[in-house]
Image (spheres, rainbow, N blue to C red):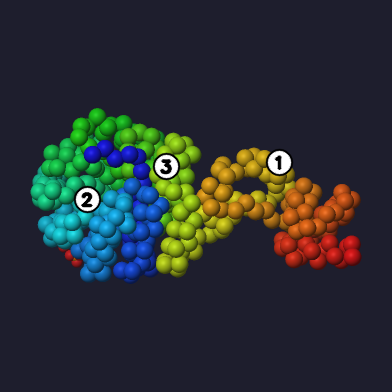
Amino acid sequence: MVIRSGILDSTLREGEQTPGVLFNRKQRVEIATMLSNARVAMIEAGHPLVSEDIYSGIRDIMDLKASGIIKSEIIAHSRAVASDVDSAASLNVDRIAIFYGVSDMHLLYKTHKSKLEALDIIYDAISYAASTGIPVRFTAEDASRTDLNFLRGIIKTAVDAGADRVSIADTLGILTPEKTRFIFNNISDIKGVQYDFHGHNDMGMAPANSLAALESGASIIHTTVNGLGERVGITPTQVMAVLMKYHMDIDAADLLQLKPLSSKIEEYTGINMPANYPVTGNYAFTHKSGVHVDGIISNASTYEFMDPSLLGMHRNFTIDKYSGKHALREKLTGMGIDLKDGEISKVLAHIKSNNTVYSDEDLREVVDSLYN
Ligand code: COA
Ligand code: ZN
């Protein structure tokens, strides 16, 4: 089946690998329901063999899938071992994702296997999983540090064994958009497979690399809400959804659900996003300097890439010594205070002489002290 380009949200799998983060069974179901309501194509719901509560959580999610409440494709993670595959298959998930580290580093120091042995292990695990009739994705862990010829051999082996998707994982976040394109340009001729891209954000490049992957052949991008994941995490769902809409006009998620999702994950993880976080941060559409606010008042597109209302966000601006007369007038008018030009200048002079941010209340006090 050809899947339209979209997002695989892995908040419940990769996201729960964030240091300090654990979801309970009820939270897992709630998060999956919210993600499905946000219309993400796929949800990686966890690695069921890891613990009983993850297993039960996925079972609850599959129950909601059966009753039509959850619509996204539900994926279970699995090592290339029969016990992991059995546990995923027993849940009758929509897809089993089998991962295996394929770089020399991972083969040598993690699994202690030769390349030939690895090919056999990967083939056996995928064909075993595929024999259940459940679609299989193979994840080439550490693909970005893997010799390209060997990576091609791995992909062909995965397809021969019955996988219809392969995820190219930049496990250490070492790629750039150019290097990401180079990999996809060198594997996109392989028949019978569609690609995911899984980009870690160790050097801050995950969203850019994910967009490059999408432009050069990947159809599914892995994300987590608020960019959770091992170490500093992976591509944030809210960033990817907006990148896909802005650059490629792809509706990968209901943009209005991104802020509620971000807030819910903040609540459940205790990790609060900084105000200047892209897309859903409290300052994402808050303007400060006089020249910017003057532009915004005239036409918001001067300084906003998207109308914040499309994201359920609100436009705002702050008043301090960086403000100009247009911003101040707009702010005071909004508060029901109409001043003449000369009076505005006087209030502005007062603001500029104080190195402080003015709340509406502070402003009202200044105006009262000068004019009442
Ligand atoms: N496929 C098959 N085997 C793999 C593998 C893979 N993709 N990746 C690692 N392994 C092997 C290692 O070589 C090691 O094997 P060994 O036991 O023969 O030495 C073992 O899996 C990992 O070591 P460890 O985690 O200490 O083993 P464990 O049996 O106690 O626990 C898990 C295994 C998976 C249950 C446990 O690590 C866990 O709960 N992990 C959370 C999920 C996870 O690690 N996900 C990574 C996603 S990228
Ligand atoms: Zn990862």
Q: Amino acid at mark 1?
A: Ser
Question: At x 13% / y 39%, what residue is drawn?
Answer: 160
Closer to viewer: mark 2 or mark 3: 3
Above-or-below relation of 248 to 76 = above
Screen quadrant of the C terminus? bottom right
Screen quadrant of the N terminus? top left
Q: Amino acid at mark 3?
A: Asp
- N-terminal of the pair, mark 2 or mark 3, is 2
Q: Amino acid at mark 2?
A: Arg
Residue 184 location (% of width, % of height): 31, 35
Mark 2: secondary structure: strand
Question: At x 16% / y 49%, what residue is drawn?
Answer: 134
Question: At x 33% / y 43%, what residue is drawn?
Answer: 220
Residue 326 location (% of width, % of height): 77, 47
Above-or-below relation of 203 to 190 = below
Question: Could you classify mark 2 by the number of other residues whose Cα lies within 10 Å: few (under 14), some (14-19), or many (20 or more)?
Answer: many
Above-or-below relation of 206 to 55 = above
* Residue under label 3: 251
Q: Does residue 20 appear to the left or right of 120 in the view shown?
A: right
**Distance Cα–Cα, label 2 vs label 3:** 22 Å
* Residue under label 2: 95
Asked if the residues shown at circle 2 and circle 3 are in contact, with their CB atoms under 8 angstroms apart, the answer is no
Farthest-out residue, top: 189
**One can see residue 203 in this view:** no
Residue 298 numbered mark, or none: 1
- N-terminal of the pair, mark 1 or mark 2, is 2
